[in-house]
Amino acid sequence: MTMSLPGLVLNRVLLGIPTLLIIVTATFVLIRLAPGDPALILAGDAPTPEFLAAINERYGLDRPILEQLLIFLGQAIRFDLGTSIYYQQPVVDVVLQRAPATIILTASAILVAALAGVIFGVWAARHKGTNIDAGVGLASLLGYSLPAFWLGQLLILLFAVQLNILPAGGMTTARIQLSGAAYYLDVARHMVLPVLTLATFELGLIARFTRTAMVEALGRDYVLVARAKGGRMNYVVWKHAFPNAIVTTITIVGLEFGVLLGGAVVTETVFSWPGIGRLFYDAILRRDFPLLTGCFILSSIAVIVINLITDLLCAILDPRTRR
């Protein structure tokens, strides 16, 4: 039975609620069981037992994990994820301050990867079995096999150290106040290398999936009929075959966009990009449990929302996916 779009949205939202609850519970418990005492880090060198006990009491760290979890769930329903131990600010505020930088970086990377991946995937499918197909396949395999930390450092050494034409890290040039077009141009220069690092992996993945979907679509009867009627190859590919292959591409782009939003830790750390990924890394080093938990939860919500949008797009383009 085919579901209506409102029914599909309701279905996905209802599925997302228990998923989020499981993620929150698992994240909270695993982080609390991890080694390291945040109270010791916050208390500094040689704290007195009274001071240490006061910190544990203030942050509820002296209570059983189950009690901490129930209190946390009650607060989380009101979108209160606690207070960061290091920043001494609400976790939601700290994460939302970093979110724009991550969204700008990952959205740019996935856009570049999607456009280039589709072009290379379609190109390889049109020349299936040729050297072009083999070359695209090899380049795609190389692209998503390269470790991000290695590629990022290689790009820094080449373009920032040797050629000195692009900045090595950060989102803007330090100690310089820019405004207007100059500010946006400066941000764009700082984005080139991290976007290239993220897009290289995603491009290879998207190209491979697009190529596979296009090969299948080009073998369908209606495509062969269109060709038999004298349709030009470019017209047949983009008018008849690609609309049926795009659902696969949208699905993989949506999944990877969600992964990037929550997992660009390595790239943001290598390039000192002030986003959520870097915040993740710093929260781990500082044993800032509330902030680490908040990062996981808000990233999980972002992934669920993106998956919902992806499902809707696929349902609109191909009603068969509503079943």
Image: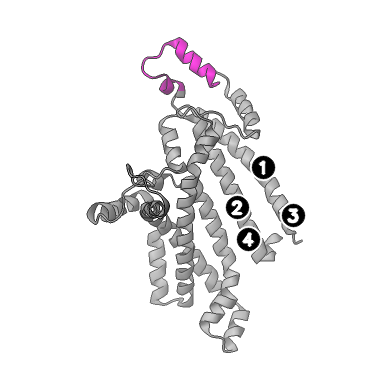
Q: Is residue 270 left or right of residue 289?
A: left
Residue at 63% across / 52% down in the picture? 308
Where does the image place residue 265, in percent across and percent down from the top left? 43, 44
Whole-angstrom CA distance, mark 3 to mark 1, is 16 Å
Residue at 74% across / 54% down in the picture? 7
Label 1 or label 4, whichever lies nearer to me, is: 4
Whole-angstrom CA distance, mark 3 to mark 2, is 16 Å
The residue to which callout 1 is attached is: 17
Which secondary structure type mostly characterizes the magenta part of the structure? Answer: helix
Query: Circle 2: is it few (<14), some (14-19), or many (20+) Cα within 10 Å?
Result: many
Where does the image place residue 283, in percent across and percent down from the top left? 44, 34
Q: Are marks 3 and 2 in contact (CB under 8 Å)?
A: no
Residue at 46% across / 56% down in the picture? 108
Q: Amino acid at mark 3?
A: Gly
The residue to which callout 2 is attached is: 307
Looking at the rendering, in which quadrant would you find the N terminus? bottom right
Label 1, secondary structure: give it: helix
Look at the image and say whether residue 138 sits in the magenta stretch: no
The residue to which callout 4 is attached is: 313
The residue to which callout 3 is attached is: 7
The range drawn in magenta is 39-61
Q: Are marks 3 and 1 in contact (CB under 8 Å)?
A: no
Where does the image place residue 14, in percent across and percent down from the top left? 70, 46
Query: Circle 1: is it few (<14), some (14-19), or many (20+) Cα within 10 Å?
Result: few
The label on residue 48 is none
Whole-angstrom CA distance, mark 4 to mark 2, is 10 Å
Q: Amino acid at mark 4?
A: Leu
